[in-house]
Image (spheres, helix red, strand yellow):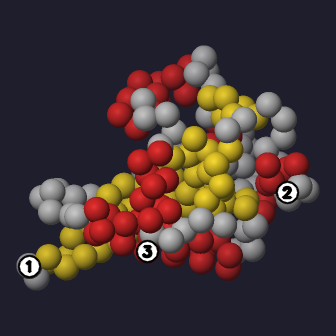
């Protein structure tokens, strides 16, 4: 298992991996997790519909809720990683890997009937996503729960990611 935080149980997520052949050996070059939303009566109890809901407060309702889409019809992309152990990937390589992972995740989301897909991304990642031809919408009316001890722990554990001012996006 690549990660385990509760969303890997009860069919709540799938982690995609990108494999490339380098010099006759298959190497992991990227990962991306898709979390499936849920209704309040799901078996996993206390977990919110999406992992992002642990980190973000909206000044009003979440965008999907504002248009009447239930939490069971949303998803979230996260745990995005490009694995470039030899520092050989060009910007074009990273864009191609990112695009392939996200397009596959969006296809899975569509097959599962999800209507709204979110991701928390810093600007650098959103540029790669847009360069891959994937359209996004940015939500600026959010507030990170920086005073929540669990959220604070994640921010401290992954400072490089969080110091780059990530925002919430929706994929089209």
Position of residue 11 relative to residue 107, above or below, is: above
- Mark 3 = which residue? 100
Residue that lies at the very extreme toward the top in this rendered image: 147
C-alpha span from label 1 to label 3: 21 Å
Identify the mark at residue 70; answer none if there is no mark.
2
Q: Secondary structure at mark 3?
A: helix
Position of residue 157 relative to residue 75, above or below, is: above
- Assess disc 1: are there few (<14), some (14-19) or many (≥20) residues with their C-alpha within 10 Å of its C-alpha: few
Please provide percent x and percent y for residue 167. 57, 41
- Mark 1 = which residue? 23
Residue that lies at the very extreme toward the bottom in this rendered image: 24
Left/right of residue 163 with respect to residue 40 in the rendered view: left
C-alpha span from label 3 to label 2: 28 Å
**Earlier-in-chain disc, 3 versus 2:** 2
In front: label 1 or label 3: 3
Left/right of residue 101 with respect to residue 34 in the rendered view: left
Residue 66 versus residue 2: which sits nearer the camera? Answer: 66
Residue 6 versus residue 60: which sits nearer the camera? Answer: 60
What residue is rendered at 63% in x and 25% in y? 145
Residue 152 versus residue 65: which sits nearer the camera? Answer: 65
- Assess disc 2: are there few (<14), some (14-19) or many (≥20) residues with their C-alpha within 10 Å of its C-alpha: some
Q: Secondary structure at mark 2?
A: loop
Mark 2 and mark 1 in contact? Answer it, CB < 8 Å.
no
Where does the C terminus fall, quadrant-wise?
Answer: bottom right
C-alpha span from label 2 to label 1: 47 Å
What residue is rendered at 15% in x and 63% in y? 88
């Amino acid at each position: 298992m690549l990660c385990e935080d509760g969303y890997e149980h009860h069919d709540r997520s799938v982690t995609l991996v990108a494999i490339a052949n380098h010099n006759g050996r298959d190497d992991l070059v990227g990962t991306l997790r898709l979390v499936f939303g849920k209704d309040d009566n799901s078996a996993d109890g206390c977990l919110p519909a999406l992992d992002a809901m642990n980190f973000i407060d909206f000044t009003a309702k979440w965008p999907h809720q504002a248009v009447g889409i239930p939490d069971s019809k949303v998803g979230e992309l996260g745990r995005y990683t490009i694995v470039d152990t030899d520092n050989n990937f060009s910007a074009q390589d990273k864009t191609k890997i990112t695009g392939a992972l996200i397009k596959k995740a969006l296809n899975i989301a569509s097959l599962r009937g999800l209507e709204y897909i979110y991701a928390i991304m810093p600007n650098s990642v959103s540029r790669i996503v847009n360069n891959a031809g994937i359209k996004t919408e940015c939500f600026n009316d959010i507030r990170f729960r920086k005073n929540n001890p669990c959220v604070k722990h994640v921010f401290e554990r992954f400072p490089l990611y969080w110091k780059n001012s990530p925002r919430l996006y929706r994929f089209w």
